[in-house]
Amino acid sequence: MNKPIRETPGSFRSARPYLLLLPAFLCLAAFTYWPMLQVLLASLSDKKRVGDSGTFVGVENYFRIFQDAHFLGALANNALYAAGTVIPSVLFGFLFALGLRETTNLSSILRSVLFFPTLVPLVGAAAVFIFVFMPDIGLLDYYLAKLGVSATNWLGNPDLALVSLMALTTWKNAGYYMLFFLAGLQGVPQDAEEAAKIEGANWLQRLYFVIIPMLGPTFAFVMVIALISAVSQIDHVIVMTDGGPNNSTSLLLYYIYQQAHEFYDLGKATAATVVTLIALLTLSFLSMRTVERKVHYET
Amino acid sequence: MKPDIKKWLAPGALLAATMCAVVFLWSTPFLWMLIASFRPDAGGGLGMASLFPDFTPTLQSYRYAIEDGYWPLWFLNSTILVTGTLVVQLVTISLAGYAFARIRFPGKEAIFYIFLLQLMLAPPVLIVPNLTTLVHLGLYDSLIGVMAPYWGSAFGTFLMRQTFRTIPKDFEEAAIIDGASWWQVLRYVLIPLSLPGLTAFSIVSVVYHWNEFLWPLMVINDPDKMVLTVGLVSFAQGAEGASDWGLIAAGTLFIMAPLFIAFTAFQRQFVNSFMSSGVK
């Protein structure tokens, strides 16, 4: 006969799951939910600095930011930056993983090299990339000159500065996303691919009809983390451009940081934070939905 | 045996060659950094960008970097930050992950979604209110203040829930029949079997916090509590450092060194734990 299972008193048993969740929850509450509420309230008041006791002004701050050319610029820049970093870095991550799968002999060396940029701190990479983008003497121009391309002021030109930041972000993140795709590719059943092969599907057809649909959840996940990082990273802006030239690299988080810590305009900073939060939640939700619709689940 | 020439000429070889070329291009900024850090007269000028190493490598940049920065202090602070964040995280995510993976309780689904909300709202986005909270808690200008917002991790909780779920329930039932309490089951059955998941989370957490810049920059005022990334920027933007690329490259390599060494040494375990942990 089995020994009787040792039971803890009933009231503790039913409280246990909540107690287990409590430590994590307390922290999330203090630094995520409570600040969200705070930021919402502050965005409706005329506080200038942290600690002011402001009065309620309704949605005035929102009118103020939506009339502020700098904010609208930051919003547009961030949208561009998100598109220009998420698409190439996810695509490169996927292609790298696919390439590594086919080159088994070298894969561990190639994989390490592609992953290294992930380990470089963004501020360090930004400091180094200032040199990469220097006109004439920088790494990029030095080698482009050998191909006959004339000197370009990458970071000093308002049309190119944001693109240069996108290139840095793509360089840094693609290797990280590659790991998720490598993991995902391991989960693609061999027999599904074999079956497609037998039916005469070429490599591209197998890629499109077998591999990509199977990786649907991976694409969804990676796109969401890439989108989140496109809105929550500004180290390189602070180090490389300070939002310039002509505010062409001012992103949402940089705008918030500037309003709060340089111009002491908490109203604008908090209203911009709320808009950023809404944008983040909407984008994450939409990208999950879109990709999920293309996923073919095994039944 | 005949050498299989056809196999070498197959698309596989072409692909391998392309991959090597792409990987070389991808590594150029990093290669340049490495070369520049050993180059004499690294003050700039034409030829600085060359990827061909000079024949007289020098450790001069490293010497200047060591003299100019408070590296031991910054290393210590970064180590405290990363360790203090991770240790608490491992406890909170294991407990919460266990509750979500194994216990049925009212409100579970709703609470889970509330947790997931944080995945999208990394603390840097909430800089302004989080600084206010730190001031109220008396944690402003302390390393604890830099750590605290990360002690509860939705990502980690989610990851541990997935990992625990992949472990067959039979193991636990066997332990329970032998008289183990829920705590012993967690401690002696589930946690040891979840090491790949815990390792993967630890890697992500350590890399993130070792390299984080904005949040420590905002929270810390006292130079004695400065971390590596903030130190690097203050030193790269200093009067002497401003155009000394060798110095900046050397400083950046200093910061990366521990992560780089750890990654190179544990490459296989690193990638395997990442892949088998269900980080998908």
Image: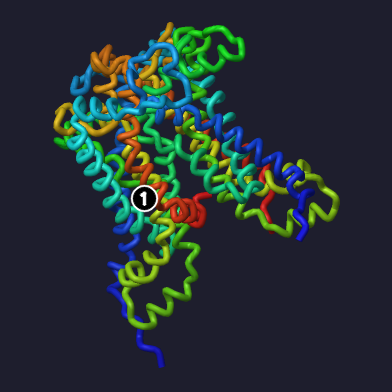
Q: Can residue B184 be seen in this view?
A: yes
In the rendered image, which quarter is residue A16 located in?
A: bottom left
**In the image: residue A171, left or right of residue B89:** right
Q: Outermost residue toward the right?
A: A200
Mark 1 surroundings: few (<14), some (14-19) or many (≥20) residues within 10 A: some
Q: In which quarter of the image is the N terminus of chain A?
A: bottom left
Q: Can residue A76 be seen in this view?
A: no
**In the image: residue A102, left or right of residue B199:** right
Percent position of residue B219, x then y? 22, 30
Tell me the residue at 30%/49% (across/down): B86
Q: In front: B175, or B20?
A: B20
Q: In front: B4, or B189?
A: B4
Tell me the residue at 36%/50% (across/down): B202
Tell me the residue at 50%/57% (across/down): B276
Q: Which colour scheme is used?
A: rainbow
Percent position of residue A145, x then y? 56, 12
Q: How many marks?
A: 1
Q: In which quarter of the image is the C terminus of chain A?
A: bottom right
Q: In front: B242, or A33?
A: B242
Q: Outermost residue toward the front?
A: B55
Tell me the residue at 39%/23% (across/down): A128
Percent position of residue B67, x then y? 19, 27
Percent position of residue A98, x then y? 64, 43
Q: State whether residue B129 is above or below residue A295.
A: above
Q: State whether residue B203 is above or below residue A282.
A: below
Identify the secondary structure beneath mark 1: helix
Residue named by callout 1: B202
**In the image: residue A27, left or right of residue B155:** left
Q: Mark 1 lies on which chain?
A: B
In the rendered image, which quarter is residue A70 located in?
A: top left
Q: Tag 1: residue type?
A: Ser
Q: In front: B128, or A274?
A: B128
